[in-house]
Image (spheres, coloured by chain):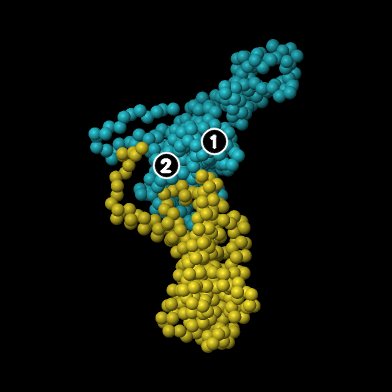
Chain colours: A cyan, B yellow
């Protein structure tokens, strides 16, 4: 965690152009419970100026709760949420933040141009409508009613509403969920175009591919906790493993010590191994146990990668 | 904690202008949004007018109380019916639906002032209510043979339009408590029996005694009687009706804020 130690210079007159010291978005030791459910457990997260952070995790990991905390739509049970050093509920924080949420529907009878005009009126220094429409890829659709837009176009309008206030911090909650491949790539292009202005972005997704395509840094969360953090390359490497299943008498400690093993678990007679190098591990298993049966090797996929990361977390704890 | 480098304070007049603009823009789009929904506009605007044609014009020359003709009497009661629908159904159902769809969350994440949001809802209810009332006036004057002095027309109009407010509060209560799917049914289950029992469809004197007693507890009864007083056909003192309507407004606003707090509590607190 970077700590802010820079002393405030009291004698200098405050310059209107000086960058504030506070991080654009910051969660500190946040726990949030809903009844008996713990959505976030002592989670800390900070986004630096100009950084695009992807919050990656399976459904129900707590991504949307983290987003809501940063938008002031929900309060932490304990811990603090800050946007540019302020409470996210203050109007001053909200004028600097834009958000794209997962929602069912938008009033359908208003046109694209009208929705953008209405949202622009909430902000002190909105972007020119033309620029919003171009950045969001809505050119030519200005006079369409929301109800007449396709799924991808609807998402683009929600993106336009998120950026029209010219925010310094943009929060995108699953911006491409439910979109086809082409629409998804289109949305990535729009996010990239917007990032070029040096803004900070927090994006949640359950697609590793999406985090990889866009993010400077990936934070993986599961069951409300950070389980891994790194560059997209680092996270990909950890998620690229294979899952090996077999029945073997070898003890778990021996298997765990084999090169290329990420994690190992035994359920009844079946041993499941997550391996970063499956060929190497399989060879060692067969050599190590001549009685080994039922060998299966499958691609681990992201869900398993999350599982492996979660498991390794438990072992450390 | 304060960040020294916030944007320079703008002159108050500029801020006030921007705030005013936000409110006006919000009203404009709230109005456009609903005007383009035929499923809302047609029943809201035409039902009170059609009912008035059936009862007010067809049986218009009969006397209700004293010298008041049916056609004149029913302008007050269907006017109440109309403004109640425009405010309670308009605000209640649409708010419940937008809340259910998550659209309210999107707006709450912006710096939109809550006052702009509320004012837009109320302004639209008042606009629709005014159109209904004017429609009734035109029908009554053209086909019902209703004649009043200009000051009486103006007073009728003002009473009915001001009477929108308690029902706007009721609409907010509904919007924050009812689910998006059940809201239309719940709203109509309140609207229609309440209208009948308050004597909005059939004059209160023609209803059974127990309904007349019950009506004393119903907000539309008080608005209709207050309006009827303008043409000399109302029962009870004006202050009692105003007091009843004001009390209901406070009650509904309290219930609406409790609903809002509960709604926020799901995510907040």
Mark 1 in CB contact with mark 2 (< 8 angstroms):
no
How far apart marks 1 and 2 lie (CA) works out to 19 Å
Residue A124 image position (x, y, % from top left): 36, 49
Which residue lies at the image location 51% right of the left edge and 86% below the top edge? B145
The residue depicted at 35 percent of the width and 55 percent of the height is: B18
Disc 1 or 2, which lies upstream in sequence? 1
Do tags 1 and 2 sit on the same chain? yes
Tell me residue A140's x, y (percent). Answer: 46, 51
Chain letter of the residue beneath label 1 in the structure image:
A
What crowding class fits label 1: few (fewer than 14 Cα within 10 Å), some (14-19), or many (20 or more)? many
In the displayed structure, does residue A270 sit left or right of residue B76? right
Residue A199 in view? no
Asked if one can make out residue A270 in the rendered structure from this viewpoint, the answer is yes
Q: Residue at x 46, y 47 (%)?
A: B109
| Vertical relation: B234 (above or below) A274 | below
Of A186 and B153, the residue lying toward us = B153
Which of the 4 image quadrants contains residue A89?
Answer: top left
Q: Nearer the viewer, residue B206 or A12?
A: B206
Residue at screen point 40% across, 37% down = A24
Q: Is residue B152 above or below residue A289?
A: below
User: Residue A50: x, y in percent?
Assistant: 40, 34
Where residue B35 sits in the image (x, y, percent)?
A: 50, 64
Near-viewer residue (A101 or B152): B152
In this rendering, position of residue B158 left or right of residue A293: left
Q: Which residue is mark 1?
A: A40
Name the element at disc 2.
loop
| Above or below, comparing residue A224 to residue B151 in the picture | above
**Quadrant position of residue A283:** top right
Describe the element under mark 1 as helix, strand or loop: strand
Total tally of numbered discs in the picture: 2
Q: For mark 2, what is the residue?
A: A87
């Amino acid at each position: 965690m970077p700590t802010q130690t820079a002393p405030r210079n009291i004698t200098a007159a405050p310059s209107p152009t000086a960058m504030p010291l506070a991080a654009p978005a910051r969660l500190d030791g946040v726990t949030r419970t809903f009844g008996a459910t713990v959505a976030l457990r002592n989670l800390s997260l900070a986004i630096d100026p100009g950084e695009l952070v992807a919050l990656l995790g399976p459904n129900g990991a707590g991504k949307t709760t983290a987003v809501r905390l940063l938008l002031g739509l929900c309060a932490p049970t304990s811990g603090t949420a800050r946007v540019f050093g302020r409470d996210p509920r203050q109007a001053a924080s909200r004028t600097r933040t834009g958000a794209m949420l997962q929602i069912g529907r938008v009033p359908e009878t208003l046109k694209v141009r009208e929705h953008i005009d209405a949202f622009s009126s909430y902000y002190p220094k909105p972007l020119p409508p033309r620029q919003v429409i171009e950045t969001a890829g809505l050119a030519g659709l200005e006079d369409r009613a929301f109800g007449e837009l396709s799924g991808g176009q609807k998402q683009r309008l929600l993106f336009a509403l998120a950026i029209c206030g010219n925010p310094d911090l943009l929060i995108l909650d699953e911006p491409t969920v439910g979109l086809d491949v082409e629409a998804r790539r289109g949305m990535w292009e729009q996010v990239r175009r917007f990032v070029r202005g040096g803004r900070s972005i927090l994006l949640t997704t359950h697609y590793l591919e999406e985090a990889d395509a866009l993010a400077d840094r990936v934070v993986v969360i599961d069951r409300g906790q950070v389980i891994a953090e790194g560059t997209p390359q680092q996270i990909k490497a950890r998620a690229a493993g294979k899952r090996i299943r077999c029945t073997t008498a070898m003890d778990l400690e021996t298997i765990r010590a084999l090169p290329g093993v990420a994690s190992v678990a035994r359920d009844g007679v079946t041993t499941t191994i997550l391996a970063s190098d499956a060929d190497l591990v399989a060879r060692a298993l067969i050599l190590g146990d001549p009685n080994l049966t039922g060998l299966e090797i499958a691609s681990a996929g992201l869900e398993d990668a999350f599982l492996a990361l979660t498991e390794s977390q438990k072992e450390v704890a | 904690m304060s960040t020294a480098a916030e944007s320079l304070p703008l002159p108050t007049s500029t801020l006030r202008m921007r705030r005013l603009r936000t409110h006006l823009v919000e009203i404009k789009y709230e109005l456009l949004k609903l005007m383009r929904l035929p499923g809302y506009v047609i029943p809201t605007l035409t039902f009170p007018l059609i009912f008035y044609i059936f009862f007010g014009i067809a049986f218009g020359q009969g006397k209700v109380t004293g010298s008041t003709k049916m056609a004149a009497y029913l302008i007050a009661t269907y006017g109440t019916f109309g403004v109640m629908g425009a405010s309670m159904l308009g605000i209640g159902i649409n708010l419940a639906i937008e809340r259910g769809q998550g659209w309210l969350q999107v707006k709450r994440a912006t710096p939109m002032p809550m006052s702009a949001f509320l004012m837009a809802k109320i302004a639209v209810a008042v606009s629709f209510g005014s159109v209904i009332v004017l429609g009734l006036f035109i029908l009554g004057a053209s086909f019902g043979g209703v004649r009043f002095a200009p000051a009486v027309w103006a007073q009728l109009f003002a009473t009915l339009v001001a009477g929108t407010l308690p029902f706007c509060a009721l609409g907010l209560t509904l919007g924050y408590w009812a689910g998006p799917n059940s809201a239309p049914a719940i709203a109509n289950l309140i609207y229609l029996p309440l209208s009948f029992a308050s004597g909005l469809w059939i004059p209160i004197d023609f209803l059974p005694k127990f309904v007349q007693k019950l009506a004393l507890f119903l907000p539309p009864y008080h608005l209709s009687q207050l309006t009827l007083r303008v043409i000399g056909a109302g029962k009870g003192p004006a202050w009692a009706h105003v007091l009843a309507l004001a009390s209901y407004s406070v009650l509904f606003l309290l219930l609406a804020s409790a609903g809002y707090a509960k709604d926020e509590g799901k995510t907040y607190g």
